[in-house]
Image (cartoon, rainbow, N blue to C red):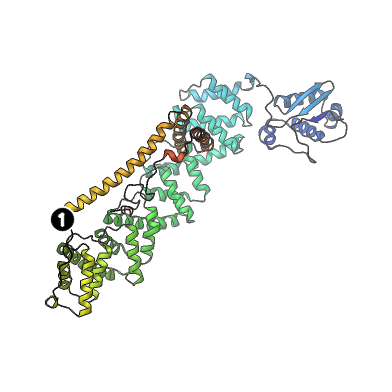
Amino acid sequence: MSFTAFSKDFTANMFTSVENQFITKYLPQANGDAVRVYLYGLYLCSCKVETDAESLAKLLKLPYSRLLEIFDFWEECDLVHVLSRAPLMVEYLPVNAAVGKPKPLRPEKYAEFNRELLRRLSKIGKDLKPYEIQRILEFLENNPMEQQAFLLVTEYCIKKDGEKVTANHILNKAKKLCEGHKFTYEQVELDLADYNKHEKTLAKIFSLLGIYRKPQEADYEFLEGWLARGMEAAAIVSCAEALKKGTLVSLDLLLSELDEKGLRTKAEAEEYLARRQVRTDVVYKVARKLGVKVQNPRAYIETYAEKWLERGYDEESLLLLAGQAFKLGYGFEELDGLLDGLYRRGVVDGAGVKDYCAVREKQLRLLHQVQSACGVMKKTGSALDMVATWQSWNFSDAMILEAAKKSAGAAAPLSYMNKLLSEWKRTGVTVPSEIPERPAPTPAKQDYRSEAAIAADMRADRERYYALLRQKALDGAEAVRAKAEKDPAFKSAERDVKKTEIELAKAEVFSPSTVPAIMEKLEAHKKARSEALARMNITEEDLLPKFRCTKCSDTGFLPSGKACDCYPG
């Protein structure tokens, strides 16, 4: 029987398996003899041959006392457990086992390191508290980073932060380097040289975006992420210049847009940005003409502007058509439908659009006269199309206005006009003098208010209708929430959710590496909140307003700015 044996937690295999944590965490700080003993002992765990400690020492050409010292060292590392010393019996433990007791740090091991660390910090008038020094020494004890490499990290952080440097910043930087398997002085020096190389690029980006602070660690992570995608540094600078003012988050959104399209060089970026600027200008100018507010132009560019410009419509033509569309209460969607119709008819060039707008303007003026003659009537695209149809029947403006006068007082003036003109077309009546006498239309209820007053009253009725609907939905949600907040468990979980969401928003900008942990914590709080609600037979949806119309959320207006069709009036 061998003097070494597996613990219950250790899985036997047909080959000797060495855990990665042993290689990354323990191997760098062990000498060659210690590694040879550990690996051969690990191999013997899976062998059926009987081997004692003296035989192993002879095989590895080591004094027996040295073998005992080595196993004592691995026991300190919590990798083995010495069951007895005479005879020597050793039990191997998994690398991730945490069975050992915390071991005191040996001051003499870090005496020179402490002096050098404090000397560098004293240059900027910075003192570390005893517990901060303890944390640094514990980091060095538990990680394979060389002491000189850690001092180099300290020097880098001092250069970046000056007297504001903290032990947390130094440790976080060192941890990230260890995660990237950068342990030696040479490896750390090379990694930090990359930061210094990108310092000028980041400073230029900050200047272009109007950011007036020193770059932080998280800022370099943004730059590294962009470069890792294959973006040229010059392309990143061009994007920052195009934004003129903003944050690294807004720059990241723009660079993601370029990355999605496979554009990564400076030339590709500048060409795309020039096109994008033209389309952005078109979107904003068209929006102003339509009276629509646009927050983020990207969706409008991709849905509308790109298509319009690719079809050959220039900015002047689009603004002319937008001006016409505004008079009919159109938004982007309706304007797009109008442009689709013109495109199918081959009306694309500037002259064709001007001719179309001139004809449409005359029809609008005629429609306005019709409104004045026959009373209140909505000025819509369908009403304008009816005017165009009547003109296509070869009726003059005078005949159309005569029909409007005879329709005054009718319950549906436009429909009555259409019947009159249809009859005149059938009977060949082409001039006002040939119009036959006919009974007056059934009068609608007389309204002595002005058109502006009627429009104002209709708008007030509409606003009141939606205000009542919205308030009812909000009151319902508020009543449910008030009931839920009487439960201490829900109230505590709700407070934790809000606090963690704020923490997550900050982490996404300043410390992206902590986001997964915060997300996990947020999910736990949300689960606690859901469980508290379930005990009261309340769902998460019950806490939200239940609007009658899901399209406009009982506001009366769609996100595009167009009036919603859910109004019953």
Kindly identify the residue that appears in the image at 28 percent across and 56 percent down. Answer: 290
The image position of residue 13, as x and y in percent, is: 78, 39
List the single residue furthest toward the left.
Answer: 433
Q: Is residue 379 above or below residue 7?
A: below
Q: Name the residue beneath numbered marker 1.
A: 447
Q: Is residue 315 visible?
A: yes
In which quadrant of the rendered view does residue 142 lie? top right
Q: Is residue 179 above or below residue 132?
A: below
- Between 19 and 330, which is closer to the camera in this rendering? 330
The image position of residue 293, as x and y in percent, is: 31, 50
Amino acid beneath label 1: Asp
- Between 154 and 455, which is closer to the camera in this rendering? 455
The image position of residue 261, as x and y in percent, is: 47, 56
Kindly identify the residue that appears in the image at 59 percent across and 39 percent down. Answer: 180
- Between 336 and 184, which is closer to the camera in this rendering? 336
Local crowd size for mark 1, using a 10 Å CA cut-off: few (<14), some (14–19), many (≥20): few
The image position of residue 424, as x and y in percent, is: 20, 76
Q: Is residue 28 left or right of residue 223?
A: right
Q: Secondary structure at mark 1?
A: loop
- Between 433 and 390, which is closer to the camera in this rendering? 433
Q: Is residue 234 visible?
A: no
List the single residue furthest toward the bottom.
Answer: 428
Q: What is the total number of numbered labels drawn onto the structure image?
A: 1
In which quadrant of the rendered view does residue 351 lie? bottom left
